[in-house]
Image (tube, grey):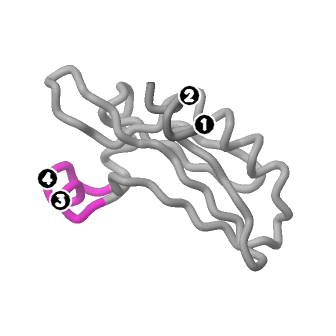
């Protein structure tokens, strides 16, 4: 329903030499609380979007729930510890580079 009334949940656009990407990272967890999560459909779209963008173009990524917060660092430890424990949607970490995507 959201998309019918307001448009795509995620999109990109170019402005004054910059490439802007807006992702929908609002995900309702099993407990009913909201967490930051990017689904596989968006990851695939993002890969394709970045492939079409010149490597010299600066990219700005916008999400509602930050991927990394001080709270996460304090309560769950360093990113290295999270990488080792990664597995389900609540702790999935994905890094996209211009040339590759690493999903943990």
**Residue that mark 1 sits on:** 43
- Kindly check if marks 4 and 2 are in contact, taking CB atoms under 8 A apart as contact: no
Q: Are marks 4 and 3 in contact (CB under 8 Å)?
A: yes
The span from disc 4 to disc 2 (Cα, nearest Å) is 26 Å
Q: Rate crowding at label 1 as few (under 14), some (14 to 19) or many (20 or more) other CA atoms within 10 Å.
A: some
Mark 3 to mark 2: distance in Å? 25 Å
Q: Eyeballing the image, is 44 above or below 55?
A: above
Reading the image, the residue beneath label 4 is 75
Q: Are marks 1 and 2 in contact (CB under 8 Å)?
A: yes
Q: Nearer the viewer, mark 3 or mark 2?
A: 2
Asked which secondary structure carries label 3, the reply is helix
For the residue pair 74 and 43, the one nearer the viewer reads as 43
Q: Secondary structure at mark 4?
A: helix
Magenta stretch secondary structure, dominant: helix
65 is higher (above) or lower (below) than 39: below
Q: Secondary structure at mark 2?
A: helix
- The residue under label 2 is 40
Q: Which residues are magenta?
A: 69-78
Q: Which residue is mark 3?
A: 71
The one of 49 and 9 positioned closer to us in this rendering: 9
70 vs 41, left or right, is left
**Circle 4 or circle 1, nearest the eye:** 1
On screen, residue 9 versus residue 89, left or right, reads: right
Q: Position of residue 14 (x, y in %)?
A: 74, 65
Q: Nearer the viewer, mark 4 or mark 3?
A: 3
Q: Is residue 28 above or below residue 56?
A: above
């Amino acid at each position: 329903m959201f998309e019918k009334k307001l448009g795509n949940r995620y999109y990109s656009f170019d402005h004054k030499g910059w490439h802007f990407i807006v992702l929908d990272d609002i995900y309702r967890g099993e407990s009913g609380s909201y967490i930051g999560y990017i689904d596989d459909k968006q990851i695939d779209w993002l890969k394709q979007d970045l492939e079409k963008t010149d490597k010299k173009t600066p990219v700005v990524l916008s999400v509602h729930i930050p991927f990394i917060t001080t709270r996460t660092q304090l309560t769950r430890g360093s990113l290295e510890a999270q990488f080792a424990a990664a597995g389900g949607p609540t702790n999935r970490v994905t890094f996209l580079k211009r040339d590759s995507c690493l999903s943990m």
